[in-house]
Image (cartoon, rainbow, N blue to C red):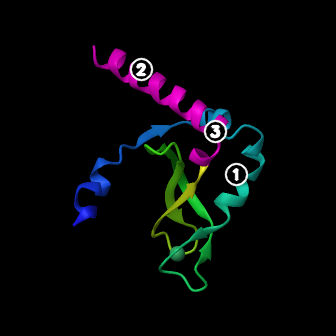
Amino acid sequence: MENYSNNSMSRKEIEITLEDVELIMGENIHFLNKYIENCFCRNCNPSLTTITNYRFFLNDLEDIILKGDCIKCSSPVARYIETGENKESAGMAKHIREIVKKYKKIKKQ
Ligand SMILES: [Zn+2]
């Protein structure tokens, strides 16, 4: 029952821009295309596919998530980029999360 309180609802995701992704990934931004072209689709066989119409999100582990559609069958696919494991990337991700929070507050007023 330990997993009960650890459900995915507590995982706060915020949408970020490509500019944010560039800041978080730093030099590794060169690999972004590799992530885009190496997605897993449970509908397709072979399951390796390319993600299209994607948007970027940041989860509370400071990982980037691409969410979009499978280029072959159009079903929804997601791709994790584990930037949270890199100290510099995680630091930048936290910084961006703060900025996005502040920006949302300003927009509400
Ligand atoms: Zn597919």
Indicate which disc, 2 or 1, sits on the residue closer to the N terminus: 1
**Beta carbon of the mark 1 residue lies under 8 A of ligand 1:** no
Q: Quadrant of the N terminus?
A: bottom left
Frontmost of labels 3 and 2 is 3
Q: Residues within 10 Å of mark 2 (few under 14, many from 20)?
A: few
Q: Nearer the viewer, mark 3 or mark 1?
A: 3
The magenta stretch is 83-109
Distance, label 3 to label 2, CA atoms, is: 25 Å
Q: Give whichever of discs 3 and 2 has the lower sequence position.
A: 3
The tag on residue 104 is none
Question: Which element is circle 1 on?
Answer: helix
Tell whether position 107 is magenta.
Answer: yes
Q: Residue at x 61, y 84 (%)?
A: 46
Report, in whole angstroms, how far the alpha carbon at label 3 lies from the one at label 1: 18 Å
- Which residue appears at 45% of the width and 70% of the height? 75
Disc number for residue 32: 1
What is the number of the mark on residue 87?
3
Name the spot of residue 59 as percent of width and height, x first: 45, 45
Q: Which mark is residue 103?
A: 2
Q: Residue furthest front?
A: 2
Residues at discs 3 and 2 in contact (Cβ within 8 Å) = no
